Image: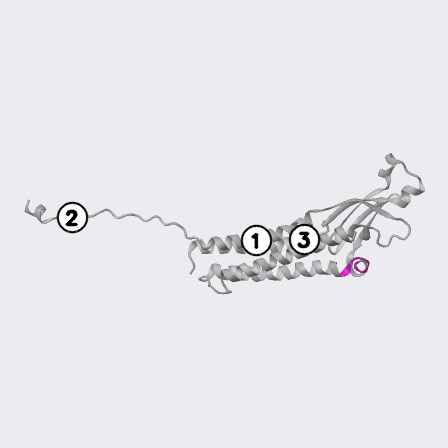
Amino acid sequence: MPSLWKRITFSVASLLCVGSVVLSVVALSTERWVTGRILCKTGAEIVNASHPEMDQFMGDINYGLFQGEKTKKCGLGMRRSTIYIFPKLVQTLNGGLHMMVILFLFVAIGFALVSLSFSVYNACKVPYQSIKGRKGLYLWNVIAGMLHALGVLCFLAAMKQHSLTERVANYQENIFVLVVLDDSLDWSFWLGVGSIATHFAACVVVAMSHFKLLRHEVKKPEQPTISAVDLLY
């Protein structure tokens, strides 16, 4: 059996791997990667709206990797619609880049599960020095963290360099043209970033397993020494 300190550190590493998987799954399944405000440019131009009247033509949008929601005002009242990235909308986006984001995150989840299994194994058994031990945990956590980072960077590239929000907002808009006033990264995106942090935190915790707890040794009372002179008295 491993020592108490090793069991604690590897158990904490296991919890961090579980946290990474949970954060990634929640990020993939939610629709708050990006939120923004949109303006119905066509409706505003038809009525020649002035600056105070622009609020009547503003809406909002939020979307994730698979779906989202859009609310627009084009002079006909508020209209809300659901956005589905697959199977058609992805064809109008940079489909390869979008698929790379999803692929990187799914593979990262797989490596996080591998790291979890190794952490649990080392918490129960004497830690190995080979790939089954700390070296393996470093490797799997670094790979998972790097894959998460690549997925996040690909999404940023699609958003900033390929006008992702504008393409999503104007999908199937045959009459009106929607202009994105501003868009920002929301909490679903930051959950993905949090997954990166958990893996590198797990590496730090595994490194701490090298340390040894200080043990306070209780000194035994010294036995009195009896010499031959003492025996004469």
Q: Earlier in the sequence, mark 1 or mark 3?
A: 3
Q: Amino acid at mark 1?
A: Phe
Along the line of sight, which residue is nearer the eye, 69 or 5?
A: 5
**From where the camera sits, is residue 43 visible?**
yes
Give the class, few, some or many, for how many residues have Cα within 10 Å of label 3's Cα (few <14, many ≥20).
many
Q: Earlier in the sequence, mark 1 or mark 2?
A: 1
Q: Amino acid at mark 2?
A: Thr
Residue occupied by mark 3: 27
Label 1 and label 2: CA atoms lie apart by 58 Å
Q: From the viewer's perspective, tell me whether residue 60 is left or right of residue 136.
A: right
Observer-side mark, 1 or 3, equals: 1
Q: Position of residue 82 (x, y in %)?
A: 80, 52
Q: Is residue 113 above or below residue 47?
A: below
Q: Amino acid at mark 3?
A: Ala
Q: Secondary structure at mark 1?
A: helix
Residue occupied by mark 1: 200
Q: Position of residue 56 (x, y in %)?
A: 86, 39
Give the class, few, some or many, for how many residues have Cα within 10 Å of label 2's Cα (few <14, many ≥20).
few
Do the residues bearing badges 1 and 2 touch, measured as CB atoms within 8 Å?
no
Residue occupied by mark 2: 225
Observer-side mark, 1 or 2, equals: 1
Q: Position of residue 47 (x, y in %)?
A: 93, 40
Q: From the viewer's perspective, tell me whether residue 15 is left or right of residue 153.
A: left
Q: Secondary structure at mark 3?
A: helix
Along the line of sight, which residue is nearer the eye, 231 or 71?
A: 231
Along the line of sight, which residue is nearer the eye, 224 or 139?
A: 139
Give the class, few, some or many, for how many residues have Cα within 10 Å of label 1's Cα (few <14, many ≥20).
some
Magenta stretch, overall SS? helix
Label 2 and label 3: CA atoms lie apart by 73 Å
Q: Which residues are magenta?
A: 90-95
